């Protein structure tokens, strides 16, 4: 167990970039009016971060499901808060996605023309926050990094955003803060429960997983506190209303990082914290969650269909696609969960690509309204081709990464009896995604050539934009044809997560039955009717745990 | 024992230094008229000397329980608060010079003396171990503050503030005095320790009465709902420099007073006051937060936020149990609040005092419009302070302070209180962020002068507070250890 290792290095490299950006201008002053130096510096720093995370991938032993590269340092240890970090396959895949996207976002920041230094600083700060929350194994640490994500994006939307940026940025912050402070209370309550039982105040995730015991009622409240925070971020309807506004008003880079990374951190929180810590509550709420997720898939798809703003359309498609992730999580078998995590990465790639393309269009035409576009396939063929490829990915066509994720989720969900119906309904979402994405493509790429009045001339993608899009396209197709490497990364982590969760589930059941029997034997004054009620409420619970007994062997993952 | 008695005077070093500075300033001003710069410099030196004296008392002199037959505590808790108070006084002097000139206050020496007197009163107050000392020091502090609130003689709002502060403040003091009288009646002694030992055995009706009056007085002084009405008017009407003083020094002293009364004296009968304080906290974090949403004056927003922060502060007192570490949380919260509050008010003073128009609304939003462009450094620090007050990173100290306070509340079983408090913390985010929105997201207002120059010392102070807000939150291990030690020795 290293004291200070590569993970800390990865987290703090962007932070160093921020400090450099704050300090360096003393020397630049005059010659950096267009922010070229700031962009260069930001690109270098984010590339170094990416290189470091590649080193991490290289040294990572993918066969192990447990956390690796652990670090533990006392922070304010009298309160049980440590600098505890570590990665497993799930977080590593997201780290790679984040660090790989950041240099691309900075390249694409060429259209940011005011306060470039501030923009790059905010992006790098955001990267630190995201990376930190992906590797934190201490709840307080996670919370701090989670909250740190707020301010940079608030500024990114508010300063460099569109017309309604103020409304959108405030809405984004208030929604997210609301969720996260409830999570804070949840964390503190959980730690308190654990401290009462084990006599030790600790925020360590693994220790809390192994030693905290609680009744179902407490578990439900805690799951709610954590779940709402993550559900707002993912977002699950009906908590999604901030997302379209934030997406539409954010600058291109902000939209990309929001769709590709930040939403995933919400889902990651579900997988890493809410589900393992509160397995029974997750089980009880499973049907509700999956209902919301599937409704979200259909609803968001239908809403996307009628949008007139391209960016808003893609924002709603994000909500729809993330519904599949939630479906895969709730089904809780290896295939579905791996699929959900795969879908997460895949959606990160696709949505990043689409938002980059929308940004490119907007930069040329200063409009995002669909009816202002037409015949792009003839005027800007390369752009139209890229768009088409990403559209195929978003639809989930085979040989793109979008297919693998959705297919695995649906397969896994279909295999578990409880969620079979929902899986069937969710398939409708795949069909709808084809409808709205293709009709969008039809409208803007084919038909009569339209040039929006008063706009710059529509030119095709420049080399810089190709540099941004090519890696994304390559990843889209590579993962679609050969998903094995990513799945191999995810699979052991998924297995060990599910195993640990099942164990904790049974453990908590045992605790509940013990406390119940203690109560009913020790407390003679308990009203018999009440006792019956308590046992009655307990019985169906153990039946619900049947959800776990649908066990799919890991061999099923080898369909790719 | 004459020798022992004399040696006790050494413990008065910080208080005597402050008073001595005040007297010298008065005398010197008789001879050399209106040397404002020199006067301020001398006061700053006096404060530094008082800090040194405090260090001498805390680290060099041997520790002992009380001095002067139980008139003053010599404990780490009092000394810590005294240090906060003296530092805040120092900060007040640092920002005073220029801003007072803009406010039209010419007699720097007079107000300096008042500040020093109030400060020394506050220092005695947080160390008072006897009802008499406590009451006298409270009056010394309060009377000086009333005068300070009205020191801008030409301004109507300043006079209004002074009158309001005086009337309502005296009422608060009278409540405390009446409560003290009952306490004396119950126990037959004026010493806090003696009272504390007898309170549990006493006639409960008398305890109820004394507790009720003292709580009312404390709520007045802390500015808790329902006795908060003076806060916004006084904070807005007084010269901004002295608002800095009220929101830091007076708040620290009132917090110390609350701990002495509720934790030390009424600690045995905790259950009697928990409910009332609980309700007051809930009201204090909710009502001012909702009112602040509709305010157009930034001073008023900060004033309402001061009421809410007093509420959060007192949550620590509610959670002052063995495992909750509530008092540590409270002191940490106080420190974080003082840093952020000092910083925010200093920026406010810097911005408003540079506007040379005579309109009353110097602190309205439009004067901050586009500050992010014209004054990037100042605006960045102001945002940092506001984020810290809101409890959002990178204002780490504010965030951690909230975390600790909520942790204390939950450990003491006040889960619902914690939930209510965090929900209103989110609502509060709204108005803090609105200020940031105006500074950064709106276009630059052309009528705003970009020639805003901040005095070097004031900028140093702002920078110090800014760094403190970040570092106190990022590296809380040592400060928390220190606080634990302080509370452990109480």
Image (cartoon, grey):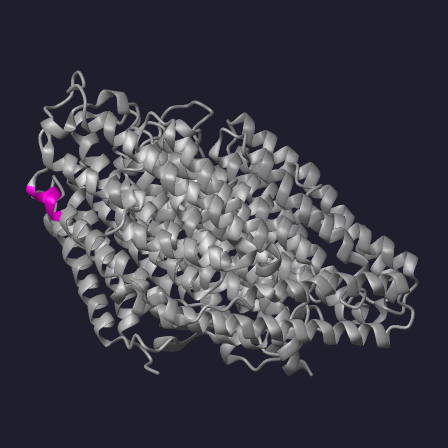
Quick check: A474 above or below A190?
Answer: above
- Horizontally, residue A520 falls left or right of residue A115, namely right
Front residue of this view, candidates A47 and A488: A488
State the count of labels: 0
Q: Quadrant of residue A380?
A: top left
Looking at the image, residue A464 sits to the left or right of residue A356; the answer is left
Q: Nearer the viewer, residue B318 or B352?
A: B318
Residue A466 is covered by the magenta coloring = yes
Question: Residue A67 appears in which quarter of the rendering?
Answer: bottom left
Query: Mostly what secondary structure, the magenta segment?
Result: helix
Seen in the picture, residue A493 relative to B284 is either above or below; the reply is: below
The segment highlighted magenta reads A463-467
Which quadrant would the C terminus of chain B be assigned to in this image? bottom right
Q: Nearer the viewer, residue B426 or A529?
A: A529
Work out whether residue B15 can be spotted: no
**Which of A448/B381 is in front?**
A448
Q: Residue at x 81, y 65 (%)?
A: B269
Q: Is residue A538 magenta?
A: no
Any part of residue A409 in sight: yes
Residue at 43 percent across and 22 percent down: it is B359
Left or right: residue B209 compared with residue A485: right
Q: Position of residue B199 (x, y in %)?
A: 84, 67
Residue at 71% from the left image edge and 56% from the top image edge: B135
The location of residue A473, given as percent across then percent down, is: 18, 49
Residue B167, compared with residue B404, is above or below; it is above
Q: Residue furthest top?
A: A453
Q: Position of residue A392 (x, y in %)?
A: 25, 42
x then y, percent, for residue B1: 69, 83
């Amino acid at each position: 167990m290293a004291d200070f290792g590569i993970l800390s290095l990865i987290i703090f490299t962007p932070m160093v970039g921020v400090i450099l950006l704050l300090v360096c201008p003393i020397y630049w002053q005059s010659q950096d009016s267009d922010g070229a130096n700031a962009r260069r510096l930001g690109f270098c720093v984010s590339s170094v971060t990416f290189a470091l995370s590649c080193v991490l991938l290289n040294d990572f032993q993918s066969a192990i499901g447990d956390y690796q590269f652990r670090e533990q340092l006392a922070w304010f240890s009298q309160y049980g808060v440590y600098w505890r970090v570590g990665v497993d396959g799930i977080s590593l895949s997201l780290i790679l996605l984040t660090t790989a996207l950041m240099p691309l976002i900075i390249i694409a920041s060429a259209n940011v023309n005011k306060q470039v230094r501030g923009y790059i600083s905010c992006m790098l700060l955001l990267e630190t926050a995201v990376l930190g929350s992906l590797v934190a194994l201490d709840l307080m640490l996670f919370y701090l990094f989670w909250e740190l994500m707020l301010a940079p994006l608030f500024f990114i939307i508010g300063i460099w955003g569109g017309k309604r940026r103020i409304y959108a940025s405030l809405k984004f912050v208030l929604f997210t803060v609301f969720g996260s402070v409830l999570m804070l209370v949840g964390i503190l309550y959980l730690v308190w429960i654990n401290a009462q039982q084990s006599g030790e105040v600790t925020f360590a995730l693994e220790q809390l997983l192994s030693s905290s015991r609680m009744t179902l009622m407490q578990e439900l409240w805690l799951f709610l506190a954590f779940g709402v925070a993550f559900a707002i971020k993912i977002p699950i309807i009906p908590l999604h209303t901030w997302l379209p506004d934030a997406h539409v008003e954010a600058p291109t880079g902000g939209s990309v990082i929001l769709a590709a990374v930040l939403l995933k951190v919400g889902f990651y929180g579900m997988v890493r914290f809410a589900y393992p810590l509160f397995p029974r509550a997750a089980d009880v709420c499973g049907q509700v969650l999956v209902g919301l997720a599937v409704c979200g898939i259909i609803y968001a798809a239908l809403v996307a269909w009628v949008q007139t703003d391209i960016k808003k359309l893609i924002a709603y498609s994000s909500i729809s696609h993330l519904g599949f992730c939630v479906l895969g999580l709730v089904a809780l078998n290896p295939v579905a969960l791996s699929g959900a995590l795969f879908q997460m990465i895949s959606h990160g790639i696709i949505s990043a690509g689409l938002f980059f393309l929308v940004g490119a269009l907007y930069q040329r035409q200063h409009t995002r309204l669909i009816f202002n576009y037409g015949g792009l396939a003839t005027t800007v063929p390369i752009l139209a081709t890229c768009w088409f490829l990403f559209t195929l990915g978003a639809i989930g066509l085979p040989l793109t990464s979008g297919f693998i994720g959705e297919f695995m989720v649906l397969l896994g969900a279909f295999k578990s009896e409880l969620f079979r119906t929902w899986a069937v309904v969710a398939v409708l979402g795949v069909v709808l995604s084809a409808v709205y994405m293709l009709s969008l493509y039809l409208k803007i790429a084919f038909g009569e050539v339209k040039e929006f009045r008063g706009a710059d001339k529509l030119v095709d993608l420049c080399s810089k934009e190709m540099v941004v899009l090519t890696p994304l396209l390559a990843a889209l197709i590579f993962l679609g044809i050969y998903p094995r490497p990513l799945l191999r990364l995810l699979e052991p982590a998924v297995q060990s997560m599910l195993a640990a969760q099942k164990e904790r589930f049974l453990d908590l059941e045992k605790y509940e039955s013990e406390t119940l029997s203690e109560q009913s034997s020790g407390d003679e004054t308990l009203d018999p009717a009440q006792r019956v009620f308590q046992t009655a409420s307990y019985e169906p619970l153990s039946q619900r745990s049947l959800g776990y007994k649908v066990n799919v062997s890991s061999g099923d993952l080898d369909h790719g | 024992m004459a020798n022992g008695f004399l040696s006790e005077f050494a413990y008065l070093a910080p208080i005597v230094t402050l008073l001595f500075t005040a007297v010298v300033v008065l005398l010197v001003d008789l001879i050399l008229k209106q040397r404002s710069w020199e006067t301020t410099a001398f006061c700053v030196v006096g404060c530094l000397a008082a800090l040194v004296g405090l260090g001498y008392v805390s680290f060099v002199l041997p520790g002992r329980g009380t001095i002067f037959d139980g008139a003053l505590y010599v404990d780490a808790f009092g000394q810590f608060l005294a240090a906060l108070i003296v530092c805040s006084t120092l900060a007040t002097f640092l920002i005073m010079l220029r801003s007072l000139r803009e406010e039209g206050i010419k007699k720097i020496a007079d107000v300096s003396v008042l500040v020093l007197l109030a400060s020394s009163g506050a220092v005695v107050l947080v160390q008072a171990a006897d009802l008499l000392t406590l009451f006298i020091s409270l009056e010394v502090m309060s009377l000086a503050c009333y005068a300070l609130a009205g020191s801008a003689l030409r301004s109507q709002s300043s006079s209004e503030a002074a009158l309001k502060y005086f009337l309502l403040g005296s009422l608060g003091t009278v409540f405390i005095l009446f409560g003290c009288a009952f306490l004396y009646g119950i126990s037959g002694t004026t010493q806090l320790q003696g009272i504390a030992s007898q309170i549990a055995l006493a006639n409960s009706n008398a305890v109820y009465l004394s507790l009720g009056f003292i709580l009312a007085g404390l709520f007045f002084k802390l500015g808790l709902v329902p006795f908060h009405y003076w806060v916004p008017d006084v904070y807005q009407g007084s010269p901004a420099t002295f608002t800095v003083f009220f929101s830091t020094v007076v708040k620290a002293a009132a917090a110390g007073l609350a701990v002495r009364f509720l934790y030390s004296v009424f600690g045995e009968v905790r259950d009697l006051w928990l409910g009332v304080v609980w309700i007051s906290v809930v009201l204090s974090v909710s009502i001012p937060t909702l009112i602040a949403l509709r305010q157009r004056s930034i001073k008023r927003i900060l004033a309402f936020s001061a009421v809410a922060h007093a509420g959060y502060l007192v949550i620590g007192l509610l959670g002052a149990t063995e495992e909750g570490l509530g008092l540590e949380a409270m002191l940490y919260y106080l420190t974080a609040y003082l840093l952020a509050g000092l910083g925010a008010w200093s920026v406010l003073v810097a911005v408003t005092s540079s506007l040379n128009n005579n309109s009353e609304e110097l602190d309205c939003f439009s004067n901050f419009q586009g500050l992010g462009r014209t004054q990037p450094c100042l605006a960045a620090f102001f945002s940092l302070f506001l984020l810290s007050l809101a409890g959002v990173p990178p204002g780490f100290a504010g965030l951690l302070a909230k975390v600790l306070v909520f942790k204390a509340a939950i450990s003491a079983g006040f889960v619902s209180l914690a939930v209510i408090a965090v929900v209103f913390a989110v609502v509060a985010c709204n108005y803090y962020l609105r200020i940031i929105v105006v500074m950064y997201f709106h276009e630059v207002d052309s009528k705003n002068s970009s020639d805003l120059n901040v005095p070097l010392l004031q900028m140093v102070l702002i920078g110090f507070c800014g760094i403190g807000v970040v570092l106190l939150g990022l590296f809380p291990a040592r400060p928390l250890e220190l606080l634990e030690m302080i509370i452990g020795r109480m």
